[in-house]
Every structure is written in C-alpha cells, then in structure tokens.
Image (cartoon, grey):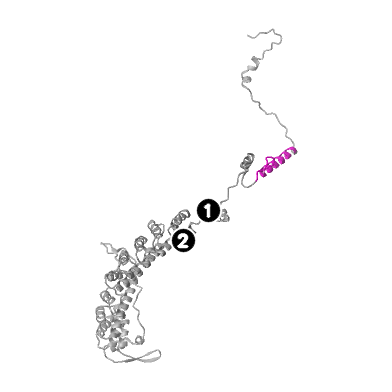
Amino acid sequence: MTREYVARDPRTGLPIAVTKQRKSTKKIKTESGPWTALTDHDVFALLNKEIETTTIRWNSKSVALTRVDALRALGRFHGVRIHQAHSLLLSYLESDVVAERVAALNVLPEVAILKSDELFDWLSVLLDDDHVDVRKAASRCLTTTSPVFPSGVHSILANELRSTVQYRSDAAWAGLKGLCDTWPEVVVDHVDSLLLEEEMVLRKKGTALLKRIVNKGDSAVWDLISWSLNDSEVEVRRVAAKNLPALARKESRMATLFAERALVDPDSEVRLSAIKAVQTLDTDHGRARELVVRGTKSKDVKVRLACIDMLPRLFGEEVLRTMANELLNEETDKRIIASLKEMAFDASLDGTEAQKNAQLAPSAPVPALDREVAEAQGQRVGMEPIRSLDTPVVGQLSSEKTVQSKDKEAEKSPKKATTEPLYRAVTQDEMMGYDDDFDIDDSDGDEEYF
C-alpha cells in the first residue's frame, strides 16, 4: 500500500510540505515462553535437524525443547540472520508434521515484519489445510497480520470474509476491525465490495464497520452510508442510520441531508436515529430547523415527541406559544398535549394573580415636581391618595425648612456696609453737553430763546 503523498521539489527532491506520518496502533507482539531461553546455536541446530531435543532451565525447572519450540524462537532474529530464519520458516510451513506447521504459522507475523517474501502465499494455502488445527492457526495468523499488512492479505481477507465456516469468517472480520484503526481507506474498499453482496448479513456487518471509520474517512465513507440508507433490507438501514449521529459531529451538512431522507423511512428505528442526528446538529442551521418543524407533524408519535421537545431550543417564547397552540389543534397523544400546553402557557395572561404580578415590571419613580403638578390638577399619582393643596409634600417641607434656616442665618449675620462705585456711567447727553445748552432759565421772562 502507498502511504500519504508528500509533495517534493522537482530540482532538489526535498519535501515541500511534510505530512504527519501515521503510526500504526497495531503491532505484532512477540510471545514469550520456554523457547526464549534457547541460545541462537541451539535454535539453528534444532531446525537444521542436527539435534532432536535440548534441555534448558525455565522457571527453576529443566524443560526439554524440540523443533516446535525452536520455530517459535525465529521471531527474535534480526539483521543478517533474518534471511536464515526466513528460509527455515518457509521450509517448515510445508512440513509433514502438523505441530510444526502450526508453530510456523504462529511465528509468521513476527518474521514478516522484517521479511515477508512468500509468507502470505503460504498463509493462503494453509487456510485450506487438511488438518483443522492448521486451518485454525492460519485464521488466527490472518487476524494478527491484517492490521499490519493490508496489501499482503487483501485478497485473502476478502475471501475469508465471505467464508461459510464460522471460525474462518469470525477471524477475518476481527482482522478487518483491526484495520479500522490503522488503514481506514482499506476498510472502505472492503465495505464497498461487501455492500454489493446479495447476502444481507454481509451488507449488515459491512455497514456496522462504518461507525469505526466515520471520523477517519472522507467522502467515500459518506457514499457508503448513503448507499446503506437506500438498502432494501430494513436491518441494513437501521445499522446505517446509527452512523448518522457520529457523522453529524464530523460533517453536519451531509448528516443533515441523510437525516432528511431517514426521517421519511418507513421504519421507526431508522427515523429515531435520524432524530438523534438532528439533535446533534447545529440547530441554528436553517435546514436542521426546518427538519425539526417538519418532524412535529410526523405520523410517528416518537418522532413528534422528540421534535417538539427540541422547539424551546430553536424559538423564542412568543413564537413557541404560537406554534404550540397550532399543534394543539391536531394533537391526540396525551404526553405531547401536556408538553404543548406547558409551552403555550403564558403566566402574564393565564396565570394566577401572583403569577401575573410577578410578570409586571416596577414602574419608574415619579419626580417630585411632576407629582406636585399632578396633585395640583387633582390627578392621582400611583396608589397614593390625593393630598390637599395645603399639605406640603415631603420635598416641599424640606425645601421650606432649608429656606427658613437660611433666613435665620442671614438675620444673625451683620449687614455689610455698601460703598459707592468708584466710577459712574456717563450718559450720551452728558457726553455731548446737551444738558448745558438746553438749561434755560426764563423765570423773569426777559430773555428769549432764538
């Protein structure tokens, strides 16, 4: 299998943008046993048939080991010796002894990590071995190697998934589940082919694996979910619909389209899975809001109840009461009616006196001046009775007391002497001298003014 593409400079060959290397979470585990105490010389001596048995100390006991144990020790060789170990393993995969073939299959994944030439070809052959122990060992080997060697076992896995033998198909499906963590794109290829099978069980199992890769895959996974939602078998559609909530968290737009289709499915379980997906979606999105409103009039009681419970998250109080009153005219289910009545209840109109008063906001205080003017005109302010004009208001009493105290202080303080201004303003007539010209004294009548 080719890994993720890395763009490189055509002149230098250096990476332009290095992608993050994906690390496999599945690794081949080396099993421990008495064979780990064998020396390298003893391992090759046993496998080359130079000796029949050898004795070692294991857990404070003397244990006699044979070629079967030596085969299990081949997984520890590295470097140059891996070639010798690989050759010995190939020779014992075609051994006439059943126990030796089983031991060779058990160590095959460990050797294949460093050198896998022809090993998977023998694995394919031994899956149809004459002895059942060898066939079961080959199935276990397939489960172990599938997550690590997807290309080496691709055709083998495809055949074993469709096997009519229970333990063989179970082992293959276990290997395919392991691939979901390491190579989800390979799982997409297998599920794509499984959805074309006529047997419903294969399509159902393949669809169930989509939940494991919906957050790791791309548009290919969305296509597989879409095809499964259109399957003729209701069991397949139910499994496919269960992937919608997970898809809603990954890709809300595609989940909205699939949920819209699933809401009109004839099966109630499919519709409920669609509702769960809608609840996961961003309800501010117009399409999701439309789906919820449409679901409030569904024929399925469970769908209606789920959609109606979502209405308070989508609409304000006024719009919610209007919608609740409209739905009450056609609703027949008691639980939904009780929920709608609770939404339609308006405490300011339908509540008790205490509830109505609680909805009233306190009025702003009336200024003292406006209060005096209103009372002077005989108008009532608030809940207080009208006071007579002779009765001063609180503000007026305080102001009068303040004025009286100021007058008393003024009387007690001595008056200051007033002084004439240093300059007096001169009138225009005085400035022009008109007062002297027109000051005529005709008291004795002898003078005459010309």
In the image: residue 28, left or right of residue 311: left
Q: Which of 85 and 91 is in front in this view?
A: 91
Quadrant where the image shows the N terminus: bottom left
Furthest-top residue in this view:
446
Residue 304 occupies quadrant = bottom left
In the image: residue 223, left or right of residue 276: left
**Vertical order, 392 against 63 (above or below):** above
In the image: residue 57, left or right of residue 422: left
Q: What residue type is labelled 1?
A: Leu
Mark 1, secondary structure of its residue = helix
Residue located at (65% from left, 16% from top): 436
Residue 272 occupies quadrant = bottom left
Residue 77 occupies quadrant = bottom left
Residue located at (64% from left, 39% from top): 376
Label at residue 349 = 1
Q: Which of 19 and 203 is in front in this view?
A: 203
Quadrant where the image shows the C terminus: top right
Residue located at (35% from left, 82% from top): 31
In the rendered image, is residue 354 in sight? yes
How many C-alpha atoms fall within 10 Å of the one at disc 1: few (<14), some, or many (≥20)?
few
How many C-alpha atoms fall within 10 Å of the one at disc 2: few (<14), some, or many (≥20)?
some
- Whether residue 280 appears in magenta in the rendering, the answer is no
Determine contact: label 1, label 2, CB under 8 Å.
Answer: no
Mark 2, secondary structure of its residue = helix
The residue wearing badge 2 is 337
Q: Which of 395 and 32 is in front in this view?
A: 395
How far apart, in angstroms, are the residues tagged by discs 1 and 2? 20 Å
Read off the magenta span. 385-411
Q: Which amino acid does label 2 sit on?
A: Ile
Which SS does the magenta portion mostly show?
helix
**Vertical order, 304 against 395 (above or below):** below
